[in-house]
Image: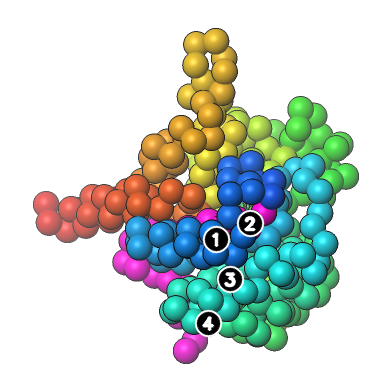
Amino acid sequence: MSVADALPRPGRCAVMGVVNVTADSFSDGGRYLAHDAALEHARRLVSEGADLLDVGGESTRPGAIRVDETDEERRVLPLVRALEAEGVTVSVDTMRARVAARALSENASIINDVSGGLADADMLPVVAEHGCPAILMHWVSPDEYRAGAGGRADYGGDVVGAVRDHLARRADAALAAGVDHDAIVLDPGLGFAKNAGDNWALLHGLDRLTDLGFPVLVAASRKRFLGSLLADPAGELRPVGGRDPATAAITTLSAAAGAWGVRVHDVGPSVDAAHVAAAWAAGRAEG
Ligand code: PMM
């Protein structure tokens, strides 16, 4: 199997279901910390049509306390083992090369590193050695983040250009480490050191990211900027549990804009949305 085959390509935008085995993720923290609960949840996402699952054992939200490496492995590895044995394509959401290496030896298919290989210098060599796909997200270091204003980094007035340049550099670093061109997926990192306006600009400017020639993953699911878009008249954010229809709308628009995939918590509606976008695009040939 070639590296490119490890990335699901279902003939529509791929849908990655989120399985957070964490105590403190903003969206579902603590719900699937026990192995059996996580496995049951993962199976439900597969039955709803997920093309792959993203298993994470450490919350990546800004300010989250880092989980001990052994704990991260204890949360993630048994689940990877069980799901891959059931034929599910699993990506592992980790910033640690050692966790990635162990997950890959348990047959994990893809590594999802929100730091794009910046948090751990061994990450890109590990990915190259295993010949697996890697999702590289736009990420700024905590120092850069603090230097910006209002919970965001300074993007010099062009957030799309800054994220595009950063992702191009991360792709170059991956190629230099020996990662296959076909194995690189890029992700704008919505909500990571970005405010709502930045996130919308990145979504609107998705074509400038797909132009780089790599598959692009969009991960907007349940994020705060959707809560503020849908705030009630008193300014109260739409609660996390009420952000799934907006997430599915973003799936439709991302698919239409050429995203390879979306990362979502509520899988079924996004699978439907991806089908709609594909049928809509195919209508061009019929008309
Ligand atoms: N966001 C979160 C976690 N992992 N991975 C990628 N590639 N892109 C993201 O935007 C991303 C991620 C945080 O969201 P969660 O707490 O709902 O998992």
Dot 3 crowding, Cα within 10 Å, few <14, some 14–19, many 20+: many
In the picture, the disc for residue 33 is 2
Q: Is residue 100 above or below residue 75?
A: below
| Amino acid carrying mark 3 in the image | Leu
Q: Are marks 3 and 4 in contact (CB under 8 Å)?
A: no
Q: How far apart are marks 3 and 4 (CA)?
A: 23 Å
x and y percentages locating residue 102 in the rendered image: 71, 79
Q: How far apart are marks 1 and 4 (CA)?
A: 28 Å
Q: Pointer 1: what residue?
A: 38
Q: Which of marks 3 and 4 is in front?
A: 3
Q: Do the residues labelled 2 and 1 touch (CB within 8 Å)?
A: yes
Q: Which of marks 4 and 2 is in front?
A: 2
| Amino acid carrying mark 1 in the image | Ala
Q: Are marks 3 and 1 in contact (CB under 8 Å)?
A: yes
| Amino acid carrying mark 2 in the image | Leu
Q: Which element type, helix, strand or loop, lies under badge 4?
A: helix
Which mark sits nearer the N-terminus, 3 or 2? 2
Which residue is nearer to you in this view: 211 or 230? Answer: 230
Q: Which element type, helix, strand or loop, lies under badge 2?
A: loop
In the picture, the disc for residue 79 is 3
Q: Which element type, helix, strand or loop, lies under badge 1?
A: helix
